[in-house]
Amino acid sequence: MQAFPKDIFTEPSNIDVDTLDNLGPLRGLAGIWEGAKGLDVNPKAAGPIRQVFVERTELQPIDPQTNGPQLLYGLRYSSHMVKPGEVETYHDQVGYWLWEPATGVIMHSLAIPRGQIALAVGRAAADATQFILRATRGATDYGICSTSFLEYAFRTDSFQIEVTINPDGTWSYVEDTVLMIRGQDEPFHHVDRNTLTRIAPPTPNPLARELHKT
């Protein structure tokens, strides 16, 4: 269990406001990305299907955040997926990637427009190029919250994402969302994966932009 200080109010001083310089293992995710060979294995009444998707993801640095003495650097992200050659949204997702330099904790929040949110956690060194984060249903920290219908029909028991920052500057992810589907005895592993290529650099966070004006 992580140890916390007795003083829960005093914020750190002399904070470096340049988020891009303090993202640790998340630095390789900053920017605007596309991936045309995503693969989604999802459940249907007749059995699992495999769907290729095209993804565009934007991850932009935010100003440093504090929870009393806790200092976090992060990226705000939005991800949009479509089937090849189509316009209709296949999947949409928003949230944050957060890094706590003092502890090596990485956090990944996500929200999807079907009434579900999750907060996953992992640890990594500042120079790590691979890391895994997990969230578990029922946890009051780093958990999963869903609508009543999803709890009834497609209960999400766990979520895991593994990220690999590749030597060529791309990055890849594999997500494993474990579902208990009503009427089925065995858990279903809803797996998504893709490799993303940067198409534009990130925009520095507002405080960093202001600092560099002087």
Image (spheres, rainbow, N blue to C red):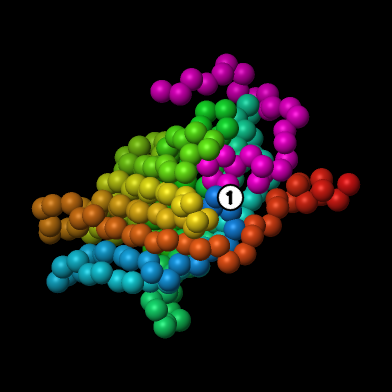
* Left or right side of 119 for 26: right
- What secondary structure is found at the residue carrying circle 1? strand
Which residue is outermost to the right?
Answer: 214
Is residue 183 magenta-colored?
no
Report the magenta residues as a range.
Answer: 1-27
Residue shown at 58%/47% (left/top)?
A: 27
Is residue 166 depicted above or below 2 in this figure? below
Q: Amino acid at mark 1?
A: Leu
Answer with the quarter of the image where residue 44 lies: bottom left
Q: Could you tell me residue 128's position as x and y percent? A: 48, 39
Residue 128 visible to the viewer: yes
* Left or right side of 89 for 68: right
The residue wearing badge 1 is 75
Answer with the quarter of the image where residue 63 lies: top right
Residue shown at 63%/29% (left/top)?
A: 68
The residue nearer to you, when weighing 54 against 44, is 54
Which residue is outermost to the front?
Answer: 168
Q: Could you tell me residue 6's position as x and y percent? A: 57, 16
